[in-house]
Amino acid sequence: MINISRRRSLLLLTLVALVLASILLFLYFKSSSDQTMTYTESRDLIRQIKQQNSLWENEILKARVALTHNYDPLVSPMTEMNRLWARFDAIEAGHGRNDSAQWNDAHEGFLQAMQEKIRLVEQFKSHNALLRNSLAFLPTAEDDIQEQLANLSDLDKLQLQNITTDTYDLLLSALEFAQLTSDDRAADIEVGLNKLKVNAQRLPPAFEAPIKIMSNHISLIAREQPLVNQLLESIENIPVAERLDTLTTLLDRDQQRADRIDRQYHFYLLLFSVLLMLSLVWLAIRLIGSFAEINRVNTALQTANDALEQRVEERTRELRDAQSELLDAARQAGMAEIATNVLHNVGNVLNSVNISSDLITRKLRNSKTQGLGKAMQLINEHPHDLGAFLCEDPKGKLLPGYLNQLVGAIAQEQQEMVDELNQMNKSVDHIKDIVATQQSYAGANSMTEPLFINELLEDALRMNAGALTRHHVTVVREYAEVPQVMGDKHRLLLILINLISNAKYAMSDLSNRPRTMTLAVKIVDDSFLEISVKDDGEGIAPENMTRIFAHGFTTRKEGHGFGLHSCALAAIEMNGHLTAHSDGPGKGALFTLQIPLISVTENA
Amino acid sequence: MSLFHHAIVLLLCGLCARASAEPLDEPLKPLPAVPQQDVRRVELGRRLFHEPRLSINNTLSCASCHQLDKNGADSRALSLGFDGKPVAVNTPTVFNAALNFRQFWDGRVETLEEQSNVVITSPHEMGSDWHTVIERISNDPDYRRDFAATYPDGVTQANVQQALASFERTLLTPGSRFDQYLLGNTDILTLEEKYGYQRFKEYGCIACHQGVNIGGNMFQKFGVFGDYIADRGNPTVADQGRFNVTRDEADREFFKVPSLRNVALTAPYFHDGSADSLEKAVDVMFQYQLGRTPTEEDKRLIILFLETLTGQREGKP
């Protein structure tokens, strides 16, 4: 729960940081617009246009006072202004400035003023050119007349002088008029022109042309001078510079606003930067906190881990101890088991030994050697007449025959005892083997040796021979042809002795019919040697069938439930198995041992 | 008086001789150099200048009237439009036209670009329209390829006008003897020619014909002293001059002062082509513009001077 809320808060923080960053980016782009650059450039263009305007006006004045006759300088500033204006317009149009009505007014105002000024300047150029030309020519025109007048001799001196003066006055009036245009002087010129016209009639026809030329030019001056003055005045009044100033003011105002907005943007930029910084710092603190927490948890985990490991180690040691104890116990149990086993097997064989020793004892007790003693007594009774005794005495006459018979009986008796002793020796050897085998039991590696199964079976039977005879058990042998095989003699013997012994016991309560035990040997599938022991004794109850090989299971009062268990184990140790079969209680039992068939030749 | 003038001229000549390498400070200015331009545009302009498909019936190119072998003008008083009818005014020379402060006799446009637009779409001259022109030019694979290589947006009205203007800006006639004189080579003019220049200034021709193009920088009334058009007879609408553009009474019969460069070769003269010789034109100018009567000698000298204004185009006079 804590984890989820922490993750959520982290996500929130990241989101906030992202939003702040995008706001900053937005503000950056907004504030870093090229407004200022445009402003500077526009201001510069306006300044240049104004400069050209001044230049233009300067050139106009120069043309007015006829300082220059070249009118190109009156064209180029205009061209330059138009060019600069086009640039300015392009820049400003690119910034949507044309949307503002005020701007549009100022814009239009300038264009109109400019157009008007151009128109007036064109007119000024035309009229000024004429005016200046005539003014420049006027002295020459007057000169031409005066020259001709001077050559006149046939005219009245006074009249001539008047005409000369009038002409000169007219020239002066015209020149004065050019300097100080007024209605008075215009009237003077009018009067002068009329006088000149009157005078011309008094002069010879040769004067007609120069006088006409002069009066034409003076008329032109009288006409053009006020026009030029008026044009100049109008040009002066054209508010091109003012319009430019208006534009500049607008630009300034816009720039101020832009500056204000810019400052605002900068403020916001700062504000959001601080916020971003704070959130980052917080994030860092959180991260450091998380890191510390992780470290702490890690340490705790480490400690817990160490403790756990220690405990595990402890437990392991305990377990190991327990296991070794268990092992010891098991070993002891095993040893006990082995001992039981050994004792059991030894007990079985001891039976035979016991029987043999009984037999020998009985034989010795009933030995015919006692007869020898009696015979010797008879002889000893007749130490001197032995020969007579032997020959005459009826008893004595029988004595040699008796001795002969005795010798035969003793010899037979000895032979029997030797046989019995041999049998006993064999049993003792078996005991020795059992003990030796059991001693090497732990080593467990079975000792295989070449053996004939049939002989082994006979040995087993012989070891139980006494009991079998005592219990009147008939043994039926169904031995198939079996080659010499490799086998563990003692384990096989152990199993067989047990099975035979069990069969014998199973039939011990049988009285109504003959006790028959069938031993069979055969080869199954060319790979297994099968040995079976069958009795027709009490049989096995089905419920006992599963437990029959379990350790400690027995149906006998004096049994310890070890025999079949060890037999089954031994069978398994030989890679074989022991199985039991019974049709039910009272119907006998069949025990079958199957072991792998390893013929000697194969092995060799 | 004239003695005084002669003295001044001599003095000037003396000064010039002393500083022969220095350009002279005169109201008349030498021809500037051809501006630096994209050669491909100029070449396209040259082809378009000779392109009859600019006229509606494929009969007229710019060069039909502005004949480059006839000093960029027409030897006829009035050139013939696409329909074979004479146009309203005499064809001014295209040479040095780039130096005129406005185009056309009435100065109705300021740039060469606008000039071609007026001529192409004029119902009396080429009679075409831009849609047709662009279509024809675009359908020509050569033009299409070259326009695409020269202009990012290919064949457009603006580009056609620009190309034509680019070519026309190269049509300057440098190297006139008078220009060389202005540039400081004062020995290039004969004494008579120098006197002619002196008369030219003295009589007041210079009041209008001055500057770099020796004219072409102002409007002036045709007929200051006397009504030339009335005297000529048969006044036409075109005779109203700039009035047709501004509708201002003050502009009636005002015309752009034409350039005097190559004037000796561009007969006939005036907006109506009414003066078929330079002598006649000079006479008209004296009578109607200057209101003066020159001596025959002065007139001869002035004409001698005017002949020094003939420049060269591509090395040819």
Image (cartoon, coloured by chain):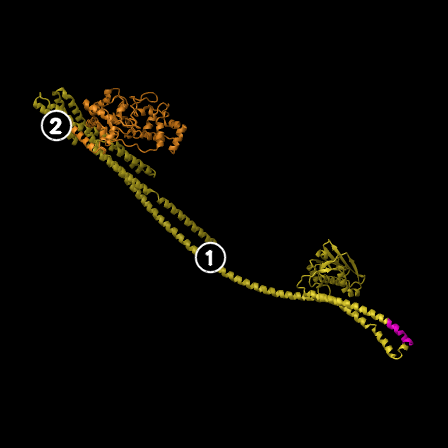
Res A169 quadrant in image: top left
Above or below, B285 against B148 in this view is above
Rate crowding at label 1 as few (under 14), some (14 to 19) or many (20 or more) other CA atoms within 10 Å: few
Q: Earlier in the sequence, mark 1 or mark 2?
A: 2
Q: Quadrant of residue B242?
A: top left
The answer to whether B202 is drawn above or below residue A380 in the figure is above
Magenta part, dominant SS: helix
Q: Colour of chain B?
A: orange
User: For the magenta stretch, what is the residue range?
Assistant: A390-404
Task: Locate residue A380, reporting x and y percent.
Answer: 86, 78
A185 to the left or right of A22: left
User: Is A392 colored magenta in this rendering?
Assistant: yes
Q: Is residue A298 left or right of residue A494?
A: left
| Residue under the point 60% across and 65% down | A322
| Image side of residue A122 versus residue B123, left or right | left
Q: Tell me if residue B296 comes above or below residue A601 in the rendering.
A: above
Q: Chain of mark 2?
A: A
Structural crowding at the residue carrying mark 2, measured as other residues with C-alpha within 10 Å and reported as few (<14), some (14–19) or many (≥20): some
Query: Considering the numbered disc 1 on the image, is that residue within a helix, a strand or a loop?
Result: helix
Whether residues under marks 1 and 2 lie with C-beta atoms below 8 angstroms apart, the answer is no
Rendered location of residue A503, percent (x, y): 76, 62
Of the pair A509 and A601, the residue shown nearer to us: A601
Q: Give the amino acid at mark 1.
A: Ile
Q: Amino acid at mark 2?
A: Asp
Q: Decide whether residue B154 is among the magenta residues.
A: no
Chain that is coloured yellow in the picture: A
Q: Residue at x 39, y 51 (%)?
A: A276
Which residue has dot 2 on it? A169
Q: Relative to the observer, which residue lies in front, A186 or B189?
A: B189
Query: Left or right of A250: which side holds A277?
Result: right
Q: Which residue is mark 1?
A: A294
